[in-house]
Image (tube, helix red, strand yellow):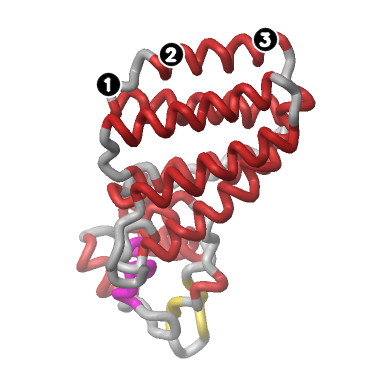
């Protein structure tokens, strides 16, 4: 049985979100101390118990640590839990977010190519039918970019599940779930963009359904990288 997550009081959760975002956005640089518990109580209008709970949670995320004589000190980024939903959410709000979005594309390419190849060798009849049905559904959504984007994610998830790569699926889902909320990641696709994307989806599906792992991996690589090249903004600070 999995261990249930410790539930945070609503006030503490709100303070955690605010402070985590402030830390990741650089309002409290690494090596500096957060305001004292008393000052935080006054700023957020909460009790010391709430601040203690919030500080404990920030420490669990690798954002801060208590230092004798210094108080609660912000840690270097290499100690942050970068896959934590709150940390990810804040990273994609930074001015240099394209650095992280580019990195996400690299991670997606590595993991999803491997998952597409594995799916080609493991997909069952039910999943094959679901993949074909999803491709047909996407074909009917080419004039509706928003709806197409939602079904696009579901198309990839069918392949992820067919690969039976639990860790790869969890990692891609975690980071992409936050990235899609960034306008710089999702872009503003035109009908031509959607048509090109759909052609790429068709190539991926054909290779997976044919059981050709090498072709599935290559089709997925071309799809992810070319799609990002079309929508990636240029000349953005930090890019």
Considering only vertical position in the picture, is 179 above or below 120? below
Distance, label 2 to label 1, CA atoms, is 12 Å
Which residue sits at x=26%, y=58%?
A: 46
Label 3 or label 2, whichever comes before in sequence order: 3
Q: Callout 1: helix, strand or loop?
A: loop
From the top left corner, tell me how far across and down residue 69 is, in percent. Answer: 47, 90
Q: Is residue 81 magenta?
A: no
At a point 59% along the width and 38% down the height, the residue shown is: 220
Quadrant including the C terminus: bottom left
Give the mark nearer the N terminus: 3 vs 1. 3
Q: Which dot, 3 or 1, sits closer to the camera?
A: 1
Marks 3/2: CA–CA distance: 16 Å
Whole-Å distance between the Cαs marked 3 and 1?
A: 28 Å
Q: Does residue 39 appear to the left or right of 77 in the view shown?
A: left
Q: Is residue 150 visible?
A: yes
Q: Using residue 191 as the reference point, say whether residue 165 is left or right of it.
A: right
Give neighbour class at mark 1: few <14, some 14-19, many 20+ (Cα, 10 Å).
some
Which of labels 3 and 2 is toward the front? 2
| Residue drawn at the location 37% of the way across and 50% of the way down | 13
Q: Is residue 10 left or right of residue 39?
A: right
Q: Report crowding for label 2: few under 14, some 14 to 19, many 20 or more residues within 10 A (C-alpha).
A: some
Residue of label 1: 143
Pointers 3 and 1 in contact (C-beta within 8 Å): no
The location of residue 92, given as percent across then percent down, is 36, 57
Q: Where residue 79 sits: x, y (%)?
A: 56, 71
| Residue that carries the numbered disc 3 in the rendered image | 126
Q: Is residue 18 visible?
A: no
Circle 2: element type: helix
Tell us which disc is closer to us: 2 or 1. 1
Which residue is label 2 attached to?
Answer: 137
């Amino acid at each position: 049985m999995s261990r249930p997550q410790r539930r945070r009081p609503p006030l503490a959760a709100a303070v955690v979100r605010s402070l985590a975002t402030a830390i990741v956005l650089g309002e409290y640089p690494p090596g500096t101390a957060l305001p004292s518990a008393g000052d935080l109580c006054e700023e957020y209008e909460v009790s010391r118990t709430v601040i203690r709970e919030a500080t404990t949670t920030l420490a669990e995320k690798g954002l801060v640590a208590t230092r004798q004589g210094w108080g609660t000190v912000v840690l270097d980024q290499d100690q942050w839990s970068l896959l934590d939903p709150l940390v990810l959410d804040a990273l994609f709000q930074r001015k240099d977010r394209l650095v992280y979005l580019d990195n996400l594309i690299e991670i997606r390419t590595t993991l999803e190519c491997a998952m597409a190849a594995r799916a080609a060798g493991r997909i069952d009849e039910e999943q094959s039918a679901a993949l074909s049905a999803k491709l047909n559904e996407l074909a009917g959504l080419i004039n509706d970019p928003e709806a197409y984007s939602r079904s696009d994610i579901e198309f990839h998830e069918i392949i992820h599940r067919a690969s039976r790569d639990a860790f790869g699926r969890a990692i891609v889902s975690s980071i992409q779930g936050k990235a899609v909320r960034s306008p710089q990641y999702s872009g503003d696709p035109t009908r031509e963009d959607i048509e090109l994307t759909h052609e790429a989806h068709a190539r991926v599906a054909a290779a997976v359904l044919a059981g050709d792992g090498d072709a599935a991996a290559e089709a997925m690589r071309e799809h992810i990288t070319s799609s990002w090249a079309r929508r990636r903004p240029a000349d953005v600070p930090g890019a």
